[in-house]
Amino acid sequence: MEVVLTKAFGFLFMIALGFGLKRGGLFTQKDTDLLTRLVMKITLPMVIVSNFRNLDLNISFLVDIGLGFLTNFLVISLVLLLTRKKQPAERAFYIINGSGYNIGLCTMPFMQSFFEAEAIAIVCMFDVGNAIMVFGITFTIAMMIAKGRGNVKGKEILKTLFSSMPFVAYIIMISISSLGIQLPNIVFDLASMLGQANTFLAMILIGIMFEPKIEKKVLKDMAGVFVLRIVVACVFSYVIYHYLPAPLLHRQVLSIVVFSPILSIAPIYTERCGYDRSAAAVLNSLMLPLSLTLMTILLIGLELY
């Protein structure tokens, strides 16, 4: 338990360090663009590549991909039902911030420090289904509700999906593994070296993005999304751990992953749907430390470390 708590504290310390450095004037919100590009276009894709070194794809990984898709779809369906009397922009806010998981910037670095490559591969497979939803289908549904049908084209969805380097890395590596092609060891060695920077950069970035300012007019919607994510995560975690037809390791890892925080680009999508971007930014900031805390509690409770 001491090791788990030490590592979890280390994550929170790095987040606090990033926030402190921003407050001290060393970083600004503008620096998040550079750090985000470094993480999303270099270090995270390298983590994904390195985790395929000794990975043998099997039917269990298809379950993980399907679950990444299904969890998002179920939450969107629930939101559409619960918010049917709200204004279009508010419904879009609930859809974008109530569903989706920030795997790359938060969960992946966190799990990477506790688990071996096989477990990280499970996280990667879940994120494939998750990425298809959050970078394409979820935003499309939100835009249709907020601004009417016909405003989002299939070309825009594909462009969004394939401009995501983690998603492209998943597709390439899954294709290579499925075809039985073995890449040279030097490729995985270099990917591993570059990927080692992912955890630190991601946590510092999260700290810089943290914004504690709250607008009173959006507190009700923020509270609604906050409660929705926690309740749904608890239900998903319980069902996955006890009933998912998959090996124990898959059930253990996925029961933790569903507590991942809100997608980092949610504020951008929220603004494009006509809602207050700051509400999504603050909600994102609040969910980050809470998600890390809950995932740490599950690690200890499930005796995984």
Image: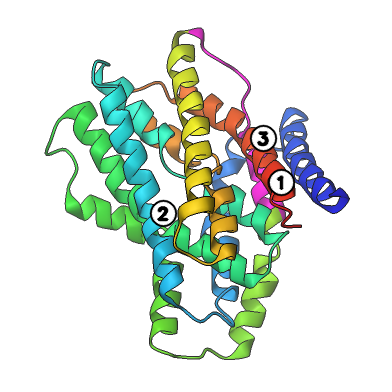
Asked whether residue 258 is in view, the answer is yes
Secondary structure under the numbered disc 2 in the rendered image: helix
Residue found 54% across the figure and 32% down from its top: 284
217 or 25, which is in the foreground? Answer: 217
In the drawing, does residue 15 fall left or right of residue 188?
Answer: right
Marks 1/2 in contact by CB < 8 Å: the verdict is: no
Secondary structure under the numbered disc 1 in the rendered image: helix
Spot the residue most to the front: 242
145 or 193, which is in the foreground? Answer: 145
The residue labelled by disc 3 is 289
x, y percentage for residue 130?
41, 53
Disc 2: CA contacts within 10 A as few (<14), some (14-19) or many (>=20): many
Identified by mark 3, the residue type is Pro
The residue labelled by disc 2 is 68
The residue labelled by disc 1 is 301
Q: CA distance from mark 1 to mark 2?
A: 23 Å
Identified by mark 2, the residue type is Gly
Residue found 24% across the figure and 15% down from its top: 85
Identified by mark 1, the residue type is Gly
Secondary structure under the numbered disc 3 in the rendered image: helix
Give above or below for 19 relative to 204.
above
Indicate yes or no whether the magenta region holds residue 215: yes
